[in-house]
């Protein structure tokens, strides 16, 4: 129906300047009460040579409504989970409940200072303790620290624990002979980086044609008495469960090493299988993946580290423990610093506490059956996508995947349409692309993880979009090669950006003055 | 769906997991709670945090500043908080442009040339700075002032323990509370960097200019850490004093104290180290039609490309908290940040003057301070502060015995723009009969 009103613009604002370019001298967006103490000259407080002399030149001066419009307009350029499926493999982009956000903003938590007295922070410590208990149960590992701030931080913590354990077991000299950390060629880049940070040399284990850890290669690498450990993601980054995990752990243990499991893919296992039952010694979890705390455009995360009883003495301090006041008194939660073998502190205070609140809320609103159902739905959705795309895209590994599946651009590449082009074209269809070119061992990889937060209708739409792109790659490759067509900007020249990086705004050079101000 | 994919039952989805590894029992976690029940539970636990509603003079790395309402409103927009790391720039320009503005603001405040997209917090940013100094200088000795926040030093020690780096401590002056230049006399040709915090853990402002001259004469780098970033609104920037790396805790910029996190680590350095800096960087880029946009750049430093040769293992950072800081700094703007800093300093000095008038109480350090200062009591500080909390409902400071058993009578007081004169007077009145 023609209403006679024509739209003058889209709702996407196409042209929002940098805030610095919007700034007008004299504008202000803040309001503060007047100073209510007797003011004394600044020079009497802080000697002049310690005072700022640039008057914060260049910092913006804008009104509150300027700020609101600025960020609201920019926000319209982002894709987000709340707009639709976000199938980034290995990233577990699931729905972030608003209820959990509300919990994290309860004044009793948000306004609590981390150095407030223990006796007056009991509720906050109880949250940490309860989350610890649930994560112990979910992983089947009794030792735990919630201090690490992200996955890679949890990895570093876990590897430092392995190092400390071997130092204690073998003595400095014995330990010095064990400096090899084994990492599969399919691993996340954080694994080797974390191992290096802990003083280990990385040796890469091959994957088999089936996409699993090569046991024969593992045996060879374990034969020299120099292996400190193995870092393994399970299910691995190809979405496949390492079905020989018990045997793998046994071989590493027999060789005197320990097994670290990267828990990035725990969304395939919660309520179904536990790393502690597989022989794993230490693992990190990603509360911002499996337990639904928001990714926030890059963080914050939270990377709890869970370990066996044997490794528990080496966890970071302080630990949060429960005692009882009297024989039948109430629970009292305490900070315990008395672990002389601890690797030390990995972060100030207690970690990313706000993420712990959200993760505990996630666990409590799901309950034992909801947690398992989420896992089931995540795997079912990935299998459904696998089924839907197999006729049009190359699937490099035959085994049925768990919660994520890898396809490649092998068929489309014959028409010179590559993974990057398929990803960009998917944007035109209204979806966020999958993880691309990872894992590195699969040429032209597209790693797709739908998570449980998507229904059948949207899965069908995604499958149809991918199949349509496969047809376009044949019929009209230019359309795919020049995608995306519907976004505010086209593909950016990243190579030029890296050659001569511009990493901050700078004011335009002022016109040359007749006289200097100095 | 099961029928369509040819799988007989849900259980069969997990056939690739060997049977003996499958969990046969149900998880021992409680049954699901409804929204009403959940809010009640957390409300009850929150209410047990009695300290959260107190008049507070606690600082030491976490600061209670006023947060304008728009900050939480804007970071709560779905488009920001439910987005991932901006790996697909065409549909992530909101996040990318925000980070570019964040990097610019951090450069302006610190007086440095480049800043990254954030680290976990101040303590881990400091640890990463030490690692970077070793990479840049190829030297292995670090000398850190012992007046740095003790937890920052602990974290740095954890990070460097297997990196072949020796972290030495330089003593601070018991009279001034500053770290004297002479404390770094052990600098030699192996010294990669000198690390100080300013204002330091005791609130005292360090002489960065003098230190910078000495450090550079020795061919080493100066790393400056800041836990109270609001001080940058008033104090000379570390960059203008000659710092090579500046790291800070950015919590003061619009982030609630939230029992210690999530906060945001700030990391800034010189242009010439753009390929040695840890963490993500956003840079300007153009599309074929010449339109300006922003991308993640210089990724060849990072773990997903360089693996064990990366400049850091960091991947997930503190994106949303960096966004909060960006919105805070833009809302407050140049004059707002200056005004907050000014009020913090004036109120803290008023509090210090009034406390110093009390019989038996003294300020042991003579150096200038911003908004935190040490008070020495004639009795043990820990029980004194407990009584103040219980009897007057005021958290009057942090007993330094919690960090150093040699300082039983000292406590650290922090004053911000949120503390009214009435509260400060109540603190002074509360302390009077207890000493």
Image (cartoon, coloured by chain):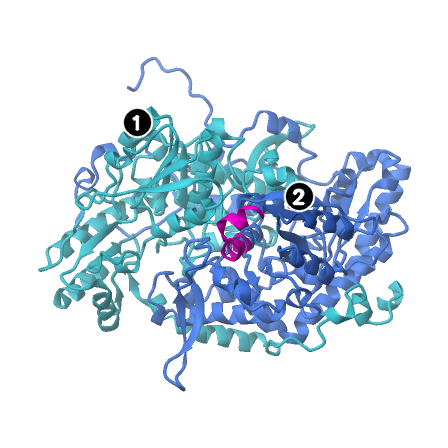
* Mark 1 → mark 2, Cα distance in angstroms: 44 Å
Which quadrant does the C terminus of chain A fall into?
top left
In front: B271, or B170?
B170
The chain letter corresponding to blue is A
- The number of numbered discs placed on residues in the rendered structure image is 2
Host chain of mark 1: B
The residue tagged 1 is B213
The residue tagged 2 is A203
CB atoms of marks 1 and 2 within 8 Å: no
Q: Under tag 2, what secondary structure? A: strand
Q: Is residue A317 visible?
A: yes
Q: Percent position (x, y) of residue B197?
A: 33, 42
Q: In the visual, does B160 lie left or right of A460?
A: left
Q: Percent position (x, y) of residue A92?
A: 67, 56
Q: Is residue B345 above or below residue A60?
A: below
Q: Is residue A509 above or below residue B24?
A: above
The magenta region covers A161-178
């Amino acid at each position: 129906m023609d209403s006679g009103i024509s739209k003058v613009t889209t709702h996407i604002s196409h042209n929002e300047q940098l805030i610095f370019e919007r700034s007008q001298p004299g504008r202000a967006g803040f309001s503060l009460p007047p100073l209510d103490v007797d003011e004394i000259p600044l020079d009497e407080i802080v000697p002049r040579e310690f005072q700022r002399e640039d008057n914060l030149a260049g910092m913006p001066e804008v009104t509150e409504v300027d700020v609101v419009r600025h960020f609201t307009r920019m926000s319209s350029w982002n894709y987000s989970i709340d707009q639709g499926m976000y199938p980034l493999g290995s990233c577990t982009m699931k729905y972030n409940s608003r209820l959990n956000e509300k919990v994290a903003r309860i004044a009793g938590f948000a306004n609590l200072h981390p150095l407030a007295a223990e006796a007056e922070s009991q509720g906050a410590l109880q949250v940490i303790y309860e989350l610890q208990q649930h994560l112990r149960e979910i992983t089947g590992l009794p030792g735990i620290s919630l201090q690490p701030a992200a996955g890679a931080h949890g990895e570093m913590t876990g590897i430092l624990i392995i190092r400390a354990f071997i130092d204690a077991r073998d003595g400095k000299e014995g330990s010095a002979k064990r400096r090899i950390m084994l990492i599969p060629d399919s691993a996340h880049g954080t694994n080797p980086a974390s191992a290096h940070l802990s003083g280990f040399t990385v040796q890469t284990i091959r994957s088999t044609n089936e996409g699993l850890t090569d046991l024969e290669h593992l045996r060879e690498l374990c034969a020299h008495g120099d292996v400190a450990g193995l870092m393994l993601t399970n299910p691995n980054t190809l979405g496949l469960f390492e079905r020989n995990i018990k045997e793998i752990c046994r071989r590493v243990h027999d060789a005197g090493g320990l097994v670290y499991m990267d828990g990035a893919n725990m969304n395939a296992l919660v309520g179904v299988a536990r790393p502690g039952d597989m022989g794993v010694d230490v693992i990190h979890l990603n509360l911002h993946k499996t337990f639904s705390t928001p990714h926030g455009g890059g963080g914050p995360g939270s990377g709890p580290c869970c370990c066996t009883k044997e490794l528990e003495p080496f966890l970071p301090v302080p630990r949060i423990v429960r005692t009882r006041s009297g024989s039948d008194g109430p629970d009292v939660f305490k900070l315990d610093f008395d672990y002389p073998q601890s690797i030390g502190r990995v972060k100030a205070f207690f970690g990313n506490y706000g993420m712990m609140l959200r993760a505990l809320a996630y666990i409590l609103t799901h309950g034992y059956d909801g947690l398992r159902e989420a896992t089931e739905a995540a795997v079912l959705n990935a299998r459904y996508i696998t089924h839907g795309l197999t006729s049009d895209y190359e699937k490099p590994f035959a085994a049925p995947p768990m919660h994520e599946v890898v396809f490649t651009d092998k068929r489309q590449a014959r028409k010179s349409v590559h993974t990057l082009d398929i990803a960009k074209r998917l944007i035109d269809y209204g979806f966020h692309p999958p993880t691309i070119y990872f894992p590195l061992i699969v040429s032209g990889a597209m790693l797709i993880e739908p998570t449980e937060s998507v229904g059948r209708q949207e899965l069908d739409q995604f499958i149809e979009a991918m199949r349509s792109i496969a047809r376009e790659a044949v019929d009209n490759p230019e359309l795919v090669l020049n995608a995306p067509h519907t976004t505010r900007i086209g593909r950016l020249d990243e190579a030029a950006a890296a050659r001569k990086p511009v990493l901050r705004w700078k004011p335009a050079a002022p016109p040359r003055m007749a006289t200097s101000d100095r | 769906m099961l029928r369509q994919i040819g799988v007989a039952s849900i259980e069969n989805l997990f056939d690739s997991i060997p049977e003996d590894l499958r969990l046969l029992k149900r998880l021992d976690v409680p049954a699901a709670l409804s929204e009403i029940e959940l809010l009640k539970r957390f409300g009850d636990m929150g209410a047990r945090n009695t300290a959260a509603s107190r008049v507070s003079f606690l600082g030491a790395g976490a600061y209670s500043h006023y947060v304008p309402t728009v900050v939480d409103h804007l970071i709560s927009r779905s488009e920001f908080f439910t987005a991932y790391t901006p790996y697909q720039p065409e549909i992530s320009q909101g996040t990318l442009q925000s980070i570019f503005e964040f990097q610019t603001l951090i450069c302006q405040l610190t007086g440095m040339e480049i800043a990254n997209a954030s680290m976990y917090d101040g303590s881990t940013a400091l640890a990463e700075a030490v690692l970077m100094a070793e990479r840049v200088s190829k030297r292995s000795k670090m000398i850190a002032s012992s007046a740095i926040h003790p937890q920052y030093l602990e974290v740095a020690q954890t990070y460097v323990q297997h990196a072949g780096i020796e972290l030495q401590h330089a003593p601070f002056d018991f009279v001034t509370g500053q770290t004297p230049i002479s404390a770094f006399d052990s600098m030699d040709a192996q010294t990669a960097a000198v690390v100080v915090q300013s204002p330091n853990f005791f609130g005292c402002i360090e002489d960065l200019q003098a230190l910078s001259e000495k450090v550079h004469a020795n061919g080493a780098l100066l790393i400056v850490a800041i836990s109270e970033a609001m001080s940058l609104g008033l104090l000379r920037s570390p960059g203008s004093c000659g710092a090579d790396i500046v790291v800070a805790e950015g919590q003061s910029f619009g982030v609630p104290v939230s029992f210690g996190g999530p906060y945001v680590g700030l990391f800034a350095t010189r242009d010439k180290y753009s390929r040695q800096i840890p963490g993500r960087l956003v840079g300007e880029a153009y599309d074929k039609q010449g339109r300006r946009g922003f991308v993640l750049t210089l990724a060849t430093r990072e773990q997903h490309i360089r693996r064990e040769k990366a400049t850091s293992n960091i991947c997930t950072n503190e994106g949303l908290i960096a966004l909060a800081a960006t919105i805070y700094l833009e809302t407050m703007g140049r004059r707002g940040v200056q005004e907050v800093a000014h009020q913090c300093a004036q109120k803290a000095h008023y509090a210090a003057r009034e406390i110093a008038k009390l019989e038996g109480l003294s300020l042991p350090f003579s150096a200038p301070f911003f908004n935190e200062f040490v008070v020495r009591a004639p009795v043990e500080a820990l029980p004194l502060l407990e009584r103040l909390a219980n009897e007057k409902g005021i958290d009057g400071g942090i007993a330094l015995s919690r960090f150093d058993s040699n300082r039983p009578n000292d406590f650290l007081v922090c004053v911000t723009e949120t503390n009214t004169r009435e509260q400060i007077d109540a603190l002074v009145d509360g302390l009077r009969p207890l000493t």
